Image (cartoon, rainbow, N blue to C red):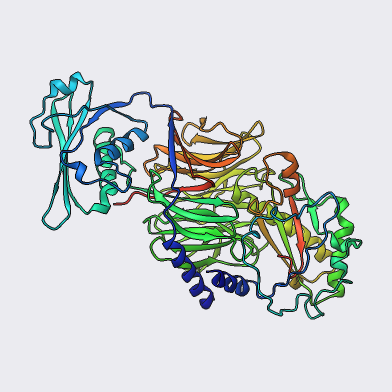
Amino acid sequence: MRALWTLIIASALTACATTETPQTQPPAGVEDRAPGTAPGTQGVPPKPVTGVDLTGGKPAASLADPLRDPSSILSQRSVYYDFDRYDIKDDYKPMIEAHARYLRENGGVKMLIQGNTDERGSREYNIALGQRRAEGVKRMMMLLGTREEQLEAVSLGEEKPKEVGHMEEAWARNRRSDMRYPGEY
Amino acid sequence: MSPMRNLLAAILVLFAACSAHAQLSIEITGAGAQRIPIAIAPLAGEAALLDASGATLSAIVRADLERSGLFRGLEVPRLVPQPTESSSVNYAEWRSRLADALVLGSVAGRPDGRFEVRFRLYDVLKQSAIGGVAYTLSRDQVRATAHRIADYVYEKLTGEKGVFSTRIAYVVKRGERFELQVADADGANEQAMLVSNEPIISPAWSPDGRRIAYVSFQNKKPIVYVQDIVVPKQLIVANFKGSNSAPAWSPDGSSLAVALTRDGNSQIYLINPDGSNPRRLTRTAGIDTEPAFSPDGRWIYFTSDRGGSPQIYRMSATGAEAQRITFEGGYNVSPRVSPDGNSLAYVTRNSGKFQVALLDLGTRQVQMLSDSDLDESPSFAPNGRQILLATIVGGRGVLTAVSADGRVKQRLTVSAGDVREPAWGPLIP
């Protein structure tokens, strides 16, 4: 059973990181990636090391990788929104610009933008809303010179809450777009 | 894709073998205005034919009828000799027990090891037999046969189809595990169609009740699948760039309406159940999603934010003549048309709470059906008498079945899990 799941996951994530690389350090006080807060990861059997190049032609991530350096703006990945809104607040523009520059300078690297919503309202409307959020980030990055082939926007709707809870504090953390590089989803 | 499919099929087969525990339990509150008092006498000989939980046919029939909110089952003392469908009925005695209706019957073993159940339904007030049926069944068909008897009684006494033999689908989240489950309408016989470590949402029954379309995140994004309920194999219907979701079957089963983002924002498309021939129905700059066909197939109701806030619209099934349906409130989503096409259930935000409302499409009157904070996913019973919805009680996901007049509520819960995304299956001929 475990072996089958491993195979499934491996074949599903063909271009995907599978090593035990530590997750990118989130901005202090905003994100919480403590084990168990990301549904869908617990209980998944360990992913096999497949040797897939995670950085699109460059050597596998090293400690010097700016994407994983907490002091680099590139280690920040999340845009947060108000309820039922998808406009990007000015606070997040420097971060998006930095990622757009990184993708311009690393033309082989791809990014998956995942749109998320809080739990209120319908699951399906939230899929559409999360998509709109992700598309907004994608569009801004394209305006900043990133090629469309490097970007895919998908929605996780309300299905993958970063924080489980039925109050505004949890909801606010769950209304966001995450910019993820290969190996991070 | 095909090695992938084979692997998934293998997984599904394995999971199909390890279900059947922790089924839904049901709690009923409220009562219909006028419940028909009915006496369902123990069927002579039924003690030899119990279901897996030890319940008798007459007990299951009574529980079914009471769950509808339209019947009150009367206590029947042990009668000697036990009356059967061929006994002469002492109407005065049953009238003295305040019964308006009466069921008598018997169970007999057959030489081939199967059983024969015979019953007759009586109108005690008119002092006449309404009708009766005989069924031949094996030992594992006790519940199914009891549901058939309850359907017969319900239809004869109310003039509407009973839904006791129908099935429901729903999603259970247990820890980090998601299960797409199918169960009898009373919550018994739960069986897993799909088990995954990634979310599953939006199950939708095909009109013939043989397949379920749903959205699974198993490949890290929403993809629409169709699966036969007895063949453990997933077929991909829509897996385009971006998100693929919100499947709804056309009434003739020939196509599915889905929400796709392959051209940018969420828009509504028709697609064949085998994934062929996608064609775009809406062309707006905003969000269009949650399509739902009218029972006659002429209209598609859907959610759109084209007017600035999410509201319900309808268009012809070819995508023309879109018109707005909801006007009150700033958030109206998840339209579901009643089986008779006369009303629309949907989710509305009401003072910050998300609740299910019922709109009479003729009179435009709105009735609130639920009163919690986070209600969603309404689904009509195929006779239109009840609406199944998902809600949160005490921090846990549960299902509630509300009668269409709002009076009777049943709560369906699972142990140690959240249950959500209900979809009531069609009548089975």
Residue drawn at x 46%, y 30% as measured from the top left: B406
Tell me: A161 left or right of A122: right
Name the outermost residue toward the top: B96
Quadrant location, the N terminus of chain B: bottom right
Q: Is residue A179 above or below residue B330?
A: below
Residue drawn at x 71%, y 80% as measured from the top left: A51
Disc count in the image?
Answer: 0
Residue B29 horizontal/vertical position (percent): 44, 29
Tell me: B275 left or right of A102: left
Indicate the quadrant where residue B329 lies.
top right
Q: Is residue B409 visible?
A: yes
> Which of the two residues, A109 or B251, is positioned nearer the viewer here?
A109
Name the outermost residue toward the right: A71
Q: Is residue B247 visible?
A: no
Residue A128 horizontal/vertical position (percent): 65, 53
Q: Is residue B208 above or below residue A48?
A: above
Residue drawn at x 83%, y 60% as measured from the top left: A25
Indicate the quadrant where residue A109 lies.
bottom right
Q: Is residue A31 above or below residue A151?
A: above
Residue A181 horizontal/vertical position (percent): 77, 68
Tell me: B348 left or right of B146: right
> Which of the two residues, B313 or B63, is positioned nearer the viewer here?
B63
Residue B70 horizontal/vertical position (percent): 34, 30
